[in-house]
Image (tube, rainbow, N blue to C red):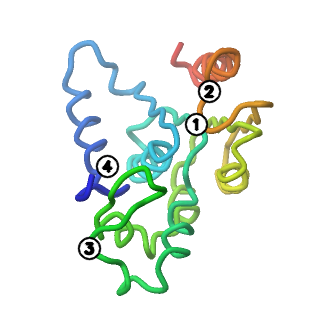
Amino acid sequence: MSKMSVMTEVSDLETIIDTAKTWDFVDADKIVLIGGSQGGFVTAATAAKHTNEIAGVVLLYPAFGIQDEVHEMFSSADDIPDTFSYHGAFKAGRQYAADIWDYDVYNEIIAYDKPVLILQGSQDHDVESYSERAAEAYKDAEYHLIEGAGHGFYGAYFDEAFSYIEEYLTRIGIR
């Protein structure tokens, strides 16, 4: 975890996409990326770099606030230490914060001009405003607020999210 960042995960996802396109059972014209939380950020950033290769994007409570959070933690990129605790959840390395210090996620994701589905929990207040902003930034975004859900969809919230995903995949011609 100390050598990982959103951008290293973008690179990893690009490798996965390239590999998946070589598999006989994958239709390279119908690759859809789905990511939640930080994975939503990674999904959006990757799709923006590969618009012609990605048929659809589903973002589940995307953590587009990571840059704001690291800016709150450190006064400048020069002040980022070699390691730091991120949300008390993991020990992050300098690269985690440095890679996105100047990255404008909203300016980048607009390169993806195909339909995007964004699902957000109404009780996930730390992320909700970022999802709303993303829905406004994209050329073609469908945004749903799942009432009562937090940062993660379980039980009935998962079922509701899954129904939106099924409808989206049908709409873009994947199902």
Query: What residue appears at the point 48 percent right and 70 percent down from the top-left corner?
Result: 70
For badge 3, the amino acid type reads: Asp
Please tell me whether residue 108 is drawn above or below residue 47 in the rendered image.
below
The mark closer to the camera, 3 or 1, is 3
Kindly state the secondary structure of the residue where label 4 is placed.
Answer: helix
Q: How far apart are the two marked residues, 4 and 3, measured between alpha carbons?
A: 19 Å
Q: How far apart are the two marked residues, 3 and 2, measured between alpha carbons?
A: 34 Å
Query: What residue appears at the point 25 percent right and 35 percent down from the top-left corner?
Result: 16
Nearer-N-terminus badge (2/4): 4
Q: Is residue 104 left or right of residue 94?
A: right
For badge 1, the amino acid type reads: Leu
Please tell me whether residue 168 is drawn above or below residue 4 in the rendered image.
above
Nearer-N-terminus badge (4/3): 4
* Spot occupied by residue 139 in the image (x, y as percentages of width and height): 66, 50
* Spot occupied by residue 50 in the image (x, y as percentages of width and height): 38, 47
Residue under pointer 4: 9
Q: How far apart are the two marked residues, 1 and 2, measured between alpha carbons?
A: 9 Å
Which quarter of the picture shows residue 76?
A: bottom left
* Spot occupied by residue 164 in the image (x, y as percentages of width and height): 68, 22
Nearer-N-terminus badge (1/2): 1
Nearer-N-terminus badge (3/1): 1
Q: Which quarter of the figure is the C terminus placed in?
A: top right
Mark number displayed over residue 60: 1
The mark closer to the camera, 1 or 2, is 2
Kindly state the secondary structure of the residue where label 2 is placed.
Answer: loop
Residue under pointer 3: 82
Q: Nearer the viewer, residue 107 or 100?
A: 100
Mark number displayed over residue 153: 2
The mark closer to the camera, 2 or 4, is 2
Query: What residue appears at the point 52 percent right and 75 percent down from the top-left corner?
Result: 71
